[in-house]
Image: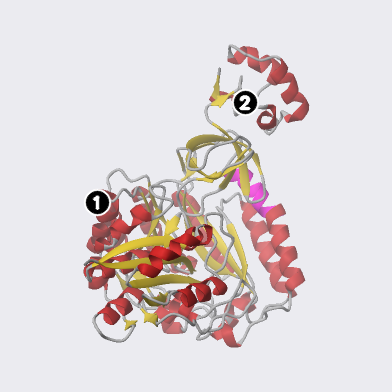
Amino acid sequence: MISEAYIIDGYVDEPACFGVPPYISPYVRYVAGVLAEHGYKVSYCTIDQLRADPMLFAPISASDIVVMISGITVPGKYLGGKPATLTDIRQIGAMLRHPVSCLGGPVTFGYASGGGEVAVRQAMMGFDHLLEGEIASALDSLLNGGEPSGTLDYNDIDRWSVSGSGIVTQHPSFPHLLCEMETARGCSRSVAGGCSFCTETLYGLPRFRTPEGVACEAEALYRSGILYFRLGRQPDLLTYGAGGGEFPKPRPDMLEKLFSGIRNAAPDLKTLHIDNINPGTIAHHEDAAREALSVIVQGHTPGDVGAFGMESADPAVIAANNLKAYPADVMRAIEIVNEVGGGRKNGMPELLPGLNFVLGLKGETEATYDLNEAFLQEVLKSGLMVRRVNIRQLMPFEGTPAYEENTLGLYATRFRAFKDKVRREFDLPMLHRLFPAGTRLCDVIIEEEGTTSFGRQMGSYPILVGIPQKLTKDTVTDVVVVDHGYRSITALTCPVEINSLPISALKWISGIGKKKAANIASKRPFSSLDEFLAVAGESPVWEYLSF
C-alpha cells in the first residue's frame, strides 16, 4: 500500500524568500522531494484552499504524514493570498490527530500578527514535530529515525529540488506560477553582525548553490510546465559565488554561468527576474558591480527589480543598527543601476532598483522621517527611476539586536504621515515616469475579476493594473496604460475596441472624462482613426485602437 503525504502551504515571506501566490517558495518543493524520496505519494494545498473548502481536511487527515510550511518575517500587503495566521496554524494542528504532523518554516523563529509588533516564539500545540533548522533536511532526518533538526547541504537540496519539482502542477495558480529559486543562504555581513533587524543572519555566513544545481532545478521545473522564475532566495545576488568579507567583490563570471545555465535549461521561459541587491556592494565595487549588472541585464527578462535594503536615510539610525549603506552610497547605487538597466525593452525598463524602508529601529527620531522624505525628493528631482518604495514597521525577532532595542510605538502618527506623503508626492509622479500613458504592458494575468478587474504581470514587484472592464480570472491580456494611482495604474485591454468599449471604461482615458466619453459614444461606430480623432482629439493611447 502506497503511503500518502500532504503538504499545507501557509506561505512564507522573509527578507530573502517569498512564497505568497502567484509565487511558490522553494521550501515547499524541497519538502516534496524529501517525501517522494521516502516513497510517499505527495499531495499539496494552500492555506487559502483550505479556508475556502474545509472538506479538504478529510483527505489531509487520512494521509500518513502532513507537513505545514509557514512564516512571515517581513510582513506586507498581499493580493494573491493571505498567509496563515497563528489561529490558522493552531487550528490545523489541533485537527491533525491521525497523521504524523510537522510544522516548519520561518514561523519557528517567532510570530506576530503584523509590522510594529514583536515576534514571539509560540507554542504550536497539536503538531507532533517542529522542523528546526533547514526544513527539508530536518524532515529527512525525522523520516530516517533521527531528530527533526537539519543543516543545509546543497547536494541534498539540489537532489530534492528536482525530485519535488512536480508538486508545482498542484498549485491553484499553475501554470501562472512564479518559482522562487534559491542561489544562496546566509549573509556576508554576518561577520560584522548584520543589520540589527534581519533574520537572514540567523542562517550564518553565505553558502552558495552551484550554477549546475540551479540549472538542473530550472530544467525540472520547466519540464513540469513552469515558465516563470525568480532568483529570489538570496540576500545579495551581486555577490553570488563571491569571496568573504563584509562587502565581497561581485563575480560577473559566476553570474554569467548562473544565467546561461538557466536559459539553456528553460529556453522558452517567459520571466527570469531577481530580487535582493545590496547597494553597499555597488558603492564599494562600482566597476565590478556595473559589469555584474550588465550580465544580469543580458540574461534576464525586462521589467526586473533589484530590491535595495536601504532601511533608513538617517546616519544615526544607520550607525546604531549596523545598516549596509549610507544615503550617498544608496544614491550612487541607484544611479549605476539606472545607467545599466534604465533602457526600455517591450515598453518596460530593463532593471530598476526598489527601495525598502524599515521604521521603528533603534535611534529613530522625528528627524529620521524628514531625512527619509528629503532623500526620496532628491531621487525624484534627479530624474532617476525607482520601481517601488516599500515602507514597513519593524517586526523584531528573538535572536536579533532589534528584539532588545527598538523604537516601536514612539512615532506611530509620524509613520502614517510619512507613508501617506510618500504615496502622494513620490509614488504617483514616479509611476507617471515609469509607465507614461500609452505604455503597453504584455501578458497581464487577471487575479481578481469584477466591474474593475485587477491583474499583474509575472515578475519581481509587478505593478498592480486596474482594468475598468469585466474580465475572467486567469485571463492573460495585453493592456495600455491610461491613468495612474498611488500604487497602481489604470489600463485598458489592448487593442482598444473603441466602438464597443463601455463609457465607464472610456472615461478613464486621460483627457476624455465622463462628458467627452458620452459624446464619443453617441457618434459611434467610427470607421477610421481620422474620423475618431476629429471627435476625441490626440492621445498616446490611440495608436492601439481597433475599429
Looking at the rendering, the stretch of residues picked out in magenta corresponds to 425-434
- Which of discs 2 and 1 lies nearer the camera? The answer is 2
277 to the left or right of 524: left
Give the residue type that dot 2 points to: Leu
Residue 425 spot, x, y in % from top left: 71, 53
Magenta span contains residue 431: yes
Mark 1 neighbour class, 10 Å CA radius: few under 14, some 14 to 19, many 20 or more? many
Picture quarter with the C terminus: top right
Magenta: main secondary structure:
helix
Q: Which mark is residue 501?
A: 2
Q: Position of residue 140 (x, y in %)?
A: 27, 77
457 or 424: nearer the eye? 457
- Can residue 19 be seen here? The reply is no
In this view, the residue in front, 163 or 483, is 163
* Nearer to the camera, 478 or 475: 475
Q: Is residue 95 magenta?
A: no
Q: Residue at x 57, y 51 (%)?
A: 384
Q: Which residue is mark 1?
A: 265
Res 212 → quadrant: bottom left
Specify which label sits upstream in the sequence, 2 or 1: 1
